[in-house]
Amino acid sequence: MADNSIPSFKAADLVIQLSSTLKSKPDVFSFGTVFTDHMLTIEWSATEGWQAPLIKPFGNLSLDPACSSLHYGIQLFEGMKAYRGDDNRLRLFRPMLNMNRMANSSKRACLPAFDQSELLECIRRLVEIDEDWVPHTNSASLYIRPTFISTEPSLGVKKPSSALLYVILCQAGSYFNNEAEALSLWADPKYTRAWKGGTGDCKMGGNYGCALFAQYEAVDYGCQQVLWLYGEDHQITEAGTMNIFLHWINEDGEEELATPPLDGIILPGVTRQSILDLTRKWGEFKVTERYLTMGQLCSALKQQQVKEMFGSGTACMICPIGHIIYQGENLHIPCQDKNSQLTSQIAKELTDIQYGRTPSDWTFLV
Amino acid sequence: MADNSIPSFKAADLVIQLSSTLKSKPDVFSFGTVFTDHMLTIEWSATEGWQAPLIKPFGNLSLDPACSSLHYGIQLFEGMKAYRGDDNRLRLFRPMLNMNRMANSSKRACLPAFDQSELLECIRRLVEIDEDWVPHTNSASLYIRPTFISTEPSLGVKKPSSALLYVILCQAGSYFNNEAEALSLWADPKYTRAWKGGTGDCKMGGNYGCALFAQYEAVDYGCQQVLWLYGEDHQITEAGTMNIFLHWINEDGEEELATPPLDGIILPGVTRQSILDLTRKWGEFKVTERYLTMGQLCSALKQQQVKEMFGSGTACMICPIGHIIYQGENLHIPCQDKNSQLTSQIAKELTDIQYGRTPSDWTFLV
């Protein structure tokens, strides 16, 4: 697996400094607030290249106040999960897709390349060391947050001459619940998440910071998330920080599961790709990467041609959409009835793979 | 000046911890690499509000690895300068414009509001304490970098519950030199700096990180900076991190100084505003905020109607543009001849104010 053409750190060089005291684990999984006992850090500099990877006690970073990750958003991250199966084995889900996306984000952010399989092996070791933190339940998991930041300590807007790749872990409860209320979305073209020629297809920090203000305007309108539109025809692009899917009878009368294509403004989600792969394998309906506009959605809703809509992402997996506020109208999206069992079916098949109930080559054993 | 309606820190509460050792000052002004002896830090939390401002020895920040300034680009900055006049007095240039823009960026980034005049007074005190660092020359200055970051130590994409406002200082040489080679720009619509509904009119970090990749592609084409275009008609928007001006005979045969309007994708530069204010006061030619396309520029160049083009910003003040690579053509822009004395004239008037040779209400004494 190792690609020797890229100068990279090696997992074989890992230095491990175990924590002398271990934290007590929280009773409730409050996402992203309590981290495990250890973290992985790997330093890079233009003069010395990659240093040996280090697993050490979780703790604060010491950063120069001029460092360009804090001034110019030269930063990126990934999100993935480790699941504990009934067999007590720990599994990651298609982690090389995350490694590959992280490499793409690094290139776009002018951060250095690395060997993706070496990083995955370092992450595997980190999860192994903190394995007690992986919940003993099928309804929760350990969230893995690889992060890559510039540590360039100067104010010129330029390629970093030093950087830090680090990975932190925290417990995550299940977002998906058949009983849960479906998502409400606020769709207003006045805010744009991403643009052609920008970084919407990379997991760079700036994509999220610039979205926060709209998120709170959505809340002011009584909604939970923003439905991000694009262009004069109000293309449907993403929902909050999720990819989006429409299950409907399309203009040609065909049953179709559709999601916007990866044209530069859509994040290439691992769950998105897995839903496409899975449903294409089923062969039960047309599965398409295509443009979808609010006009098409409104017209299909009027004709009762919409079966369901849902968001997808690593944090939530699949999240049904219940209604959309758009141009003063509250659009009701069918969900949680007998016509809309697709989300449940996809969720079951994906969790069966993630928790090891279904053998799959998407599984990576820790 | 104080606005008591905004909960804010107060300069009157400043705590000052002087450094016991002082650094030796560098002989050469290498921008943004060597910082002064002290920094200003002001902490905020949702539960306790603003803490007392603190001036303390310059040093590293200790940040939680989960903090959302490092993951979601919840960060912003400002750039301003202190100038030492022949009278040995230190002056800032229109600093309330920076304070106002910083407040706008804070709102957009979901960071808390503050009293702008209180921050200015804290910055004045910091510059006063490190005043020996303000160069004793008319060709250099002290660069002031206010920075505002989220310190929220959790991974949810949400409004920060804690934040840090800090200010660091470094010496800056003069960018403007009549003998200097004029800037070369690379104009390709495949990258976009900012878009309607985004954050291009705020000084948020993500605007810069997402621009870096294009900057190095410009260098590959033998150019120094990117000329950022927008839309299908290839509107001229900014050059590198500068606003842009065109001095020409316009379509109606009028002599005009033009710069793109503040329509949401243009940073409201302090130097940009000052050039507009100054040249409007002169009344020698039409001064307009208007759209300019590459088509209009190419056509005006063919008809020899272009007098000059220049970028403006706090770092460079005014920077003449020498040529633009666009659609395979190398467009020569007139500069540094007798038809293009405008950059020199503007630079002289602005520096005369900045260094106190011309009295002005744009001056703020330290």
Image: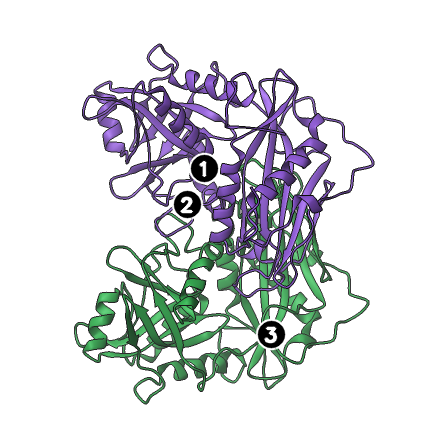
Chain colours: A purple, B green
- Provide residue B223's location: percent of width, then percent of height: 40, 71
Q: Quadrant of the C terminus of chain A?
A: top right
Task: Check the residue under mark 3 and report the chain it is in.
Answer: B
Callouts 3 and 1 close, C-beta under 8 Å: no
Q: Is residue A312 left or right of residue B166?
A: left
| Residue A220 appears in the figure | no
Instruction: Give the alpha-carbon distance from disc 3 to disc 1, as whole Å.
Output: 41 Å
Q: Which mark is residue A215?
A: 1
Q: Residue at label 3?
A: B30
Q: Is residue B311 left or right of residue B153?
A: left
Classify residue B309 by image quadrant: bottom left
- SS state under label 3: loop
Q: Which mark is residue B24?
A: none
For badge 1, the amino acid type reads: Gln
Q: Is residue B178 above or below residue A89?
A: below
Q: Is residue A63 left or right of residue B339?
A: right
Judging depth in this view, the residue of A287 and B1 nearest the camera is: A287
Judging depth in this view, the residue of A228 and A361 nearest the camera is: A361
Q: Is residue B201 above or below residue A288?
A: below
For badge 3, the amino acid type reads: Ser
Tags 3 and 1 on a common chain: no
Q: Which mark is residue A200?
A: 2
Q: What residue appears at the point 56 percent right and 35 percent down from the top-left corner?
A: B156
- Provide residue B99's location: percent of width, then percent of height: 53, 60
Q: Sort mark 3 into few (<14), some (14-19) or many (20+) by Cα contacts within 10 Å.
A: some
Q: What residue appears at the point 63 percent right and 16 percent down from the top-left corner?
A: A87
